[in-house]
Structures are given as structure tokens and as C-alpha cells.
Image: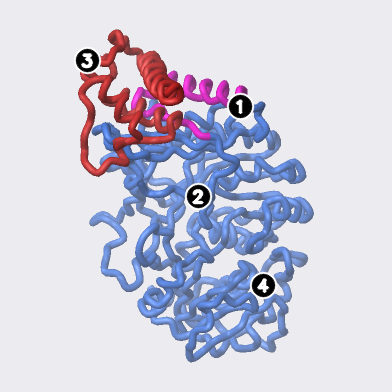
Chain colours: A red, B blue
Amino acid sequence: MNKLWARTMSVKLTIMQQMEQVAQEHGRILAPLNDELVLANCGLDSLGFAVLVARLEDTLGVDPFTAAEDAFFPVTLGDFVKVYEHGGR
Amino acid sequence: MNMAGVEAPSLRAYVANAPAARFIWDRAASVRFTDLARGTSLAGRLADLARRSVLVTTASQLTTALALIELDGIARRLVILPPDIEADHLGAVMAAAEIDAIVTDDGARPHAALTLPVRVTCAPSIVPLDETPPVAVRTEWVLLTSGTTGVPKMVVHDLGGLTAAITSRSAADAAAIWGTFYDIRRYGGLQIFLRAMLGGASLVLSSAGEPVADHLARLAQHGVTHLSGTPSHWRRALMNAAIGTIAPHYVRLSGEIADQAILDTLRAVFPQAAIGHAYASTEAGVAFAVNDGCAGFPAAFAGTIRDGVEMKIVDGSLRVRSPGAASRYVGNGQPLTDADGFVDTGDIVERRGERYYFAGRQGGIINIGGLKVHPEEIEAVINRHPQVRMSLVRSKRSPITGAIVVADVVLTSQDEAGNAGQIEVKDDILKFCRAALPRHKVPAAISFVPSLPVAATGKLARRLG
């Protein structure tokens, strides 16, 4: 139970940290991050997201979008985090 | 037309007229020019190769060099097989070039076990000849391109065209000792081989599988004065401690973009040397050499005729019309030039101020959500970082923008601190990129690697992605 919680938190924290980092590098201001935040409104543009996904592959070891059969992309930050927690399933 | 060619001196004549004590060396053997003037490396079979279409396929560069010297003016056609040809393509090459004789050496490669009417073994032990055979034909020299897919193109030259850019033949040239990191079976290396032979200068060749350190040690031992290679060759050599044992007077780069970083590094390592970068392609021949130590070339080069060579820029791509250009492809109806006789090199240039800079290859563009990027322009920025020796920028698939760029980087000092130091350098390189490049050209990720693969052509191995 504890372990699962730690993994969940670390994935979510990593994603949020990387979002801050990419936003800063790209000179963008991020909206306050919460599960309901619609990604299209979070402050990162498509290039920012492309970089974020590449960075997350480095840190989390998975790119769930490129690995997936169908083209899909989550709408909210909460959904985005879930995709990573489930390793692309 | 043909008569003029027949009257031109053959390669053997140049070698025969060289001063005494001129040699071609590789790791295992050496051959003295004067021995070759009245001798043969072809086991007395020179006459059997007359007017034939000869495939030269040897394990060592030295035996190819000897075969070329002996067969220019004798064979109808010389097809020079580079060491990295895929065995699958050999049949097509031989059929298209109507090969009816083969010259090989003791290190015979497996595919050399082909049955042909004439098969001659070339060896660096020279047997005296009673008389050298008269020059009978204008030999076609056929070079293979280094295409990444399919059967390589076969590009037809003759000795006059191949040597069109070699103008100065002074006494100083004859005292030179040339060396090259190239393989002479590719255009860039062949230029150096011919430069040495026409100038009556000695030449140090590398041997197959020879470590860089051993090659550098031999270059030092022979006192190399003129040394050529691609920027990747040079970067690899600079990573070797033995670079300190050579002191060339002339350092030449070609075959890849010579960025300011490599020019500055070579200037610092060889403060006494003249440093030049040349532009050439197998099809277009040598277009120019730049000797001012700056990357790119003066804008005035385009639109003017210099040494018979004319250049123009069409849709960003460099086009060259030159007496050194190839005449055609073998077994391929494709035209080599545009309607005006210009070869489209596929090398993209950008003008900044009074200079053109090479940006990359036409086919090498990475598309990032509609924005086009040349990996080479990003590498040029990364390479300017003082702790970077060389870099490779490549495309990585992205679900969002189709592609993004990532970089593999070799540091100057491999033991650059531990993890903490590496993260710091990584951040610093990214900062460097952000200061010099628009956002989409900044690598999304940087990986440190111990080395980068350099292809047999001397160019950085780029995967198409």
C-alpha cells in the first residue's frame, strides 16, 4: 500500500517538476497544477509537451504515447499522470 | 576528344618522374616510386588487363594505389571498390560496369572469389619490367557513391577531371609527405592520393583495422607534413594523446561541414600549420578550398568563376559546374547535372553577411511540428562548448510534434567529474543552445556517450529517422 502510494506520488511529482522545468526553459508561465487542469490551458505549447514527453522518457523510462497502438492524448493533467502511472496501458 | 586524353600523361608517368626517395607506405609495406617506374606489382600480367573493365577490390589501400598507378592508360575502365560495399550489391555493380577482369590482393575478401576471365593478384613486391606498356586508352575511373540505401551509384571520371583542382606542382610540393585519415577508395581520399602522386610526394596510408594511435604514430615516424581528413576524423584524432607527436605544416578538412569549433581547435593544436577546408563531392569534384580559418566560404564565390569552377545557390542548395565534375553515371540513365551543366550537391547553405555557411543536407532535415531543422546546425553550436569534442544530433519520434531533436555528446575529457559534474555540463550545454538557437532547435535531451560511430567514409554515421 505504502509502496504504491510512493510510486504514484513520485510519478506525479516528477511530471510536475519537469513541467515547471520545461516551462521555465521555454519562457512560459504555468497555470496552477491540479488534476482537473486542462492540458491545453496549462501554459505549455505543443513543442513544450514534446520536450516534456522526451524528458519523462529519460526520467521515468517510458514513453506511453509512442508505445501506444492508437493515437490518443489525455485532456487533463490527472489523466496525463494516470497514463504514466499505468506505464502506457 | 579521345586523342587529347591519350596524349595526357598517365599516372605512371607522374610517378616515374618523381624525385628519388619517394615512397608510399602502409603499416605492412612500402613501395619506392622509382621501382614502380620500371616495375610492376601485378605479377607480370599487365598486358592481360589491357583494355579491360577492371574491378579493383583489395584488402589494403596500398595495393589499390599500385593498381591505379599501373592501370591508368592501360585498362578501359577501373572500378574502385570501397571497403564497405555490401556484398549484395557487388553483382549489380559488376554487371552494370561490364567487369571482365579483377585485381585483388592477398587479403582477398570473400566476394573476391568470383570467377572472371582474368584475375590478377597485386602485391607490394615490385618485379622489374623490361619496358612499360605504352598508354593506349583514356581510362575511365569509376567511383562508388556512399548512398545509404540501394545499389551505390557509379560515377565516371577520368584522370584529367580528377586532377583538375590540383594546380600547383612546385618543388615544395615534392618535398611534402602526405597523410590522410581517408580511405583512398573514396573521392576525398583519392584526391589526396593523386595530389601526392602528381606532386611527386610521399604518402602515408592507413591500414585496415589500424587503431588511430598506431596510425598517428606512423604519421609521426614518417614526418608527415600535409594531413587530411574529415572533421570527424580530426575530432577522433584529437581525442588521442598521440596527436601531440605530429606537426603537419598543412591541415586539410573536407567531406563534412568544418565548423568554427574544429577549425579553432586545430589552430590551437597546430599553431604553425596552414589550415584549410575544401569542398568536394564525388559527382561535382572539388569546388573550392578556404584557407582563412573561418567556417563557410565568402559569398563572392557564388556567381563567379574561380579556377574554372562556377557555383550558384538554387533553393538554398549549392550547385557546382566544374571541369572536375564527373561525366556521367554507369548503367543509370539519370542525368548527373541540370540543363546548364551544374551538379546539385544537395548541400544546403545559408548566407549570413558576406559569407555562406553550410547548414546540412537536403535529405537530412528533421521536421518538428512543421519547423525544419538541420542536425548539423545544432551540432555546430554544441561543438562550440569548450568541454565538447563532438556531437550527433538526431531525430526522435514524438507523439506531439512528429519529431524532436536529441543530442549525443562526446566530452573532451571522458572522466569529466562524476554524475554531479555531468549534470552541470549538460545544463551548461543546454544554456549554450538556448542562447544561440530558437526553441525548437534546442535538444530535448542530451546523452553523454564515450564515442560516436564514424562511417568508412569518414563521416559521422547518421541514421535516417
Residue B215 lies, in percent from the top left, at 70, 55
Instruction: State the CA–CA distance, disc 1 to disc 4.
Output: 60 Å
Query: Label 3, on which residue?
Result: A41
Residue A5 lies, in percent from the top left, at 41, 21
Please state which amino acid type lies under the numbered disc 4: Ala
Q: Earlier in the sequence, mark 4 or mark 2?
A: 4
Disc 4: CA contacts within 10 A as few (<14), some (14-19) or many (>=20): some
Task: Establish if B431 lies above or below B366.
Answer: above
The answer to whether mark 2 and mark 1 are in CB contact below 8 A is no
Query: Label 2, on which residue?
Result: B459
Disc 2: CA contacts within 10 A as few (<14), some (14-19) or many (>=20): some
Local secondary structure at mark 2: loop
Residue B381 lies, in percent from the top left, at 47, 29
Task: Establish if B269 lies above or below B105.
Answer: above
Instruction: State the CA–CA distance, disc 2 to disc 1.
Output: 30 Å
Query: Label 4, on which residue?
Result: B16
Residue B357 visible in rendering: no
**Horizontal relation, residue B243 to residue B163: left or right:** right
Most extreme residue toward the front is A1
The answer to whether mark 4 and mark 2 are in CB contact below 8 A is no
Q: Earlier in the sequence, mark 2 or mark 1?
A: 1
Local secondary structure at mark 1: helix
Q: Which mark is residue B419?
A: 1
The answer to whether mark 4 and mark 3 are in CB contact below 8 A is no
